[in-house]
Amino acid sequence: MMDIEKTMAFILEQQAHFAADMQMMRASFEKHDAEIAEIRKLSAANTESIRQLIDVSMSLAHNAAEMEETDRRLAARLQELAESGAHTDRRLDALVDILNKLTRRNGGAS
């Protein structure tokens, strides 16, 4: 009878260890589940932040392209104005020459 009691005591002790180990595993799983949930939340937040950064980057790229086009148009317009100014200068020079000739022809008298 002694062997049966020792065996029963051993089995009960093993079951107690097993139950304690199971409880520790459950606690560990619950902890890991909470950590995974937190990681998922952070991942979702990071994904949204990345999406916003992509949107901002695309907007900046679009605006940069528009600014380059505006710069090209302004450069072309400045070139036109420079040419027009040069043409005006030539016409004014011709007018000054005409006035000088007329003044000399009339004896320079006012």
Image (cartoon, helix red, strand yellow):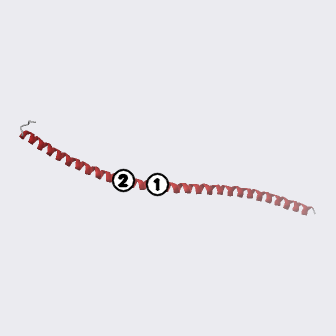
Please tell me whether mark 2 sits on a helix, a strand or a loop: helix
Q: Residue furthest top?
A: 109
- Please rate how many residues cluster around mark 2, counting C-alpha atoms within 10 Å: few if below 14, some from 14 to 19, many from 20: few
Residue 21 image point, x, y percent: 77, 58
Relative placement, left or right, of 88 versus 70 is left
Q: Which residue is mark 2?
A: 68
Along the line of sight, the residue nearer the viewer: 33 or 1: 33
- Labels 2 and 1 touching (C-beta < 8 A): no
Residue 71 image point, x, y percent: 34, 51
Q: Position of residue 31 (x, y in %)?
A: 70, 55
x then y, percent, for residue 43: 59, 56
Tag 2: residue type? Glu
Question: Which residue lies at the image location 88% right of the left edge and 62% below the top edge?
Answer: 8
Q: Is residue 54 left or right of residue 82?
A: right
Name the amino acid, label 1. Answer: Ser
| Residue 61 vs residue 17, the one in the foreground | 61
On residue 57, the disc is 1
Q: Is residue 110 above or below residue 14?
A: above
Q: Residue at x 11, y 40 (%)?
A: 100
Residue at the far right in the pictured view = 1
Q: Toward which corner of the image does residue 92 lie, by quadrant?
A: top left
